[in-house]
Image (spheres, grey):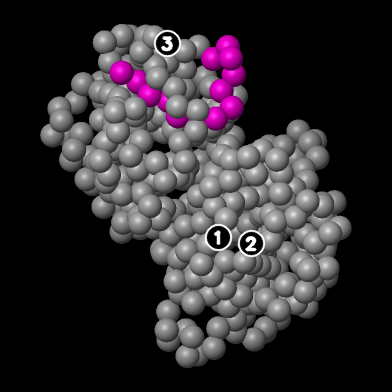
Amino acid sequence: MKLVFFGLTISSSWGNGHATLLRGLFKALTARHHRIAFFERDVPYYAAHRDLIDMPGVDLYLYNDWSEIAATARDVVAESDVAVVTSYCPDGIAATELVVSSNINLNVFYDLDTPVTLEALQHGEQLAYIGPRKLADFDLVLSYTGGAALMALQDELGARRVVPLFGSVDPDMHHPAPARAAYEADLSYLGTYALDRQSVLNDLFIQVARHLPERRFVLGGSKYPIDFPWQPNIWYVQHVPPSAHAAFYCSSALTLNVTRGAMARMGYCPSGRLFEAAACGVAIVSDEWAGLDAFFQPGVEILVARDTTDVIAAMQLSRAEIARIAKAGRQRVLDSHTAAHRASELETILEGASLECGGLAPLCSGAERHMF
């Protein structure tokens, strides 16, 4: 198949969770002989932190204004099998109008931020990627979030077919790696600053650092404000590029996962950081949310913390117990949550949706299917 995407970014991993996830998925899809085109608005803050220019099997179209790229986008869509518009695409409404008015086999919306999308619209906010007809014109809606979110996308946004496509990890990039002195910690946390997870981060990281002044804590991520409540034993790394994620995780005994507020409230929305850290063979302490046990077995493959004392207790476990949990978590990811798993799932989803959409021709020939 040839798939064309209109999204936020794949060229820069700075300050967003889309780039790393989509790079892994695209790598797995191209390995399965699919071709990808990706349209991305060339904004200054991503251009200043660009860490990918070329990707085998992927045509990247960077543009400054939709009007300058619309004709090219129309031509690329015309020669593609599937067109996908993602959440947070800055020209999502224009891209939607283009793909739903085309004769493409299948048009798809992929919401990588479903709980945030739903809450924003419930509060009356205008989104650049959701137009007045919402999701009613798409043949298929993919959701990064499962559970109640799937029904909400139908009931509140008019989606006709909704299927979950969860996050994943590229194990070639995220794997056990040598530690680096700059990242060494008893507990690490990697994540862009977000106000809606600050209270949980305060309980599960900052307060832990206050209670354990002799321990070392490292926080990596961009957009942290000047008045962030830093502690003397918290070291800060402003940006950790994907190429350094493995070293970052593997330099700490435990790493913390904190889910964004909307995602935690809705549940069944695993952060990509969960899969990345587990694939690196590091034991994870995560905040609690509905559906977590569908991805990792608490107490066996992951540790769950409800408050400061739970994190302190996790940090006091024996090295052998922490290593056992880390090993089990890594195995679960390799068995269930790699980008190759999601690419295979996506093929199946797209084939099924294509057949349901008025008897459209199969997206792959019989020979190609045999190859997968």
| 341 up-or-down from 333: above or below | below
Marks 3 and 1 sit apart, C-alpha to C-alpha, by 40 Å
Estimate how packed mark 3 is, as few (under 14), some (14 to 19) or many (20 or more) residues with alpha carbons within 10 Å: few
Name the amino acid type tagged 3.
Gln
Distance (Cα) linking label 2 and label 1:
8 Å
Location of residue 300 in the rendering, given as x and y in whole percent from the top left corner: 24, 41
Instruction: Give the numbered dot on residue 155.
Output: none
Q: Which residue is mark 1?
A: 54
- Bin the neighbour count of mark 2 within 10 Å (Cα to Cα): few under 14, some 14-19, many 20 and up: some
Q: Is residue 316 magenta?
A: no
Query: Mark 3 or 1 closer to N-term?
Result: 1
Q: Give the residue displayed 29% in from the left and 28% down from the top.
A: 181
How many marks overall? 3
Observer-side mark, 3 or 2, equals 2
Q: Which residue is mark 3?
A: 231
The residue identified by callout 2 is: 60
- Quarter of the rendering occupied by the C terminus: bottom left
Residue at the spot 47% in from the left edge and 13% down from the top edge: 230
Residue located at (71% from left, 79% from top): 79
Q: Earlier in the sequence, mark 2 or mark 1?
A: 1
The image quarter in which residue 186 lies: top left
Q: Is residue 335 above or below residue 347?
A: above
The N terminus sits in image quarter = bottom right
From the top left corner, tell me how far across and down residue 96 is, in percent: 78, 60
Provide the secondary structure element on which disc 3 rests. loop
Q: Nearer the viewer, mark 3 or mark 1?
A: 1
Q: Nearer the viewer, residue 2 or 298?
A: 2
| SS at mark 1 in the image | loop
Q: Is residue 27 left or right of residue 171?
A: right
